[in-house]
Every structure is written in structure tokens, then in C-alpha cells.
Image (cartoon, rainbow, N blue to C red):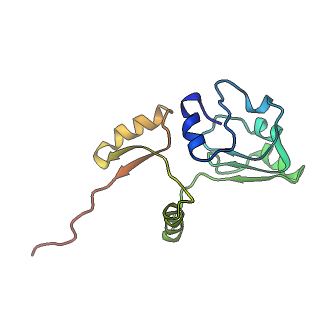
Amino acid sequence: MCSTANVDLVNSLGAVGVIDYTREDFSKTGETYDVIFEAVGKSSFEDGMRVLDEDGIYINITVPFPDLRMLLALSASRRKILLGENAPESAEDLAFIKSLVEAGELRPVIDRVYPLEEIVEAHRYVDQGHKKGNVVITVAQMDTEMSV
């Protein structure tokens, strides 16, 4: 699910089907889904549960902890709920992600790149809510040699 401006991008990433949320409400199509993946907080938990298969998985990376509605949904069905909002933290996690990218199994989408000195501008851009992919902050490598 994405806006009209992102339909081609999502298709290019290999989506089997894309719903343009500016034209169609995914929760009212009559379809059911094996996986609901909420990455930007644009749809409600209730809408996701309404169209999730009984054995489906609801993934939300914008919510770190389940609330009461989520706990009740878990207890009443075979569905699974995965939550979290933290990026990989260990060197092993980052190495694994790197290997997926190098193998062509994961294709990151980079919208813009900012040097560290422009981090305020980068945050302003992200806060507008219209980025298409990731915003990268580059940090110059420091020269480790020191003269005495």
C-alpha cells in the first residue's frame, strides 16, 4: 500500500500487487492478506486485523510494545503480531543485512543523502512525511594518524 507517487517504485521492488491508498481503502476491498506490514503508521490496527487471514501475521515497525487491543487479538486467534521500532544494533545484525544487500536479496531505497553537517535539514525533510525510502547521513572518516 502506498500513494500514487510511489506505485511504480513499489512495483519495481517486486510487489505482487499494490494498493494506492489515495484511491482505495485496503480494508474495504473484500480481500484478505497473509501479511500486513505497517511501516509508516498510516493504517489502523483494527483495519489490519479486519483483513488479515486467520493464520496471518501483522507486522508493525512503528510500535515498540503491544497495547490491550493487540493482546486481545492475540488471545482470540491464531494470528501473530510482530512489533518493534529499533534498527539492528549489533555488528552481526549489520553484517547480515549487508550480506542480503550484496546477494541482491534486499534492495534498499535511498531517497536522499545528507552530510552530517546538514543533519538538521535531513530531519526537516523526513518530518515532512514524504520521503521515498531512506535518508542517509554520511559521516566523514576521521584520519587516525596523529603527528607528534
Name the residue: 64% across, 34% down: 42
Residue nearest the observer in this picture, 41 or 109 = 109
Q: Give residue 16's quadrant in the image.
A: top right
**Outermost residue toward the right in this view:** 76
107 to 92, vertically: above or below? above
Name the residue: 35% across, 37% down: 121
7 to 91, vertically: above or below? above
Left or right, 54 with respect to 59, comes to right
Left or right, 24 with respect to 91, comes to right
12 to 104, vertically: above or below? above
**Outermost residue toward the left in this view:** 148
Q: Where is residue 112 drawn, in percent x and y?
A: 39, 42
Q: Where is residue 10 drawn, in percent x and y?
A: 58, 41
Name the residue: 80% across, 29% down: 28
Q: Which quadrant is home to the N terminus?
A: top right
Q: Give residue 141's quadrant in the image.
A: bottom left
Left or right, 138 with respect to 90, comes to left
Name the residue: 74% across, 32% down: 26
Q: Where is residue 88 drawn, in percent x and y?
A: 54, 61
Residue nearest the observer in this picture, 14 or 125 = 14
**Outermost residue toward the bottom in this view:** 148
Q: Where is residue 50 drawn, in percent x and y?
A: 83, 37
Count of number-bearing discs: 0
Q: Give residue 146's quadrant in the image.
A: bottom left
Q: Which quadrant is home to the C terminus?
A: bottom left
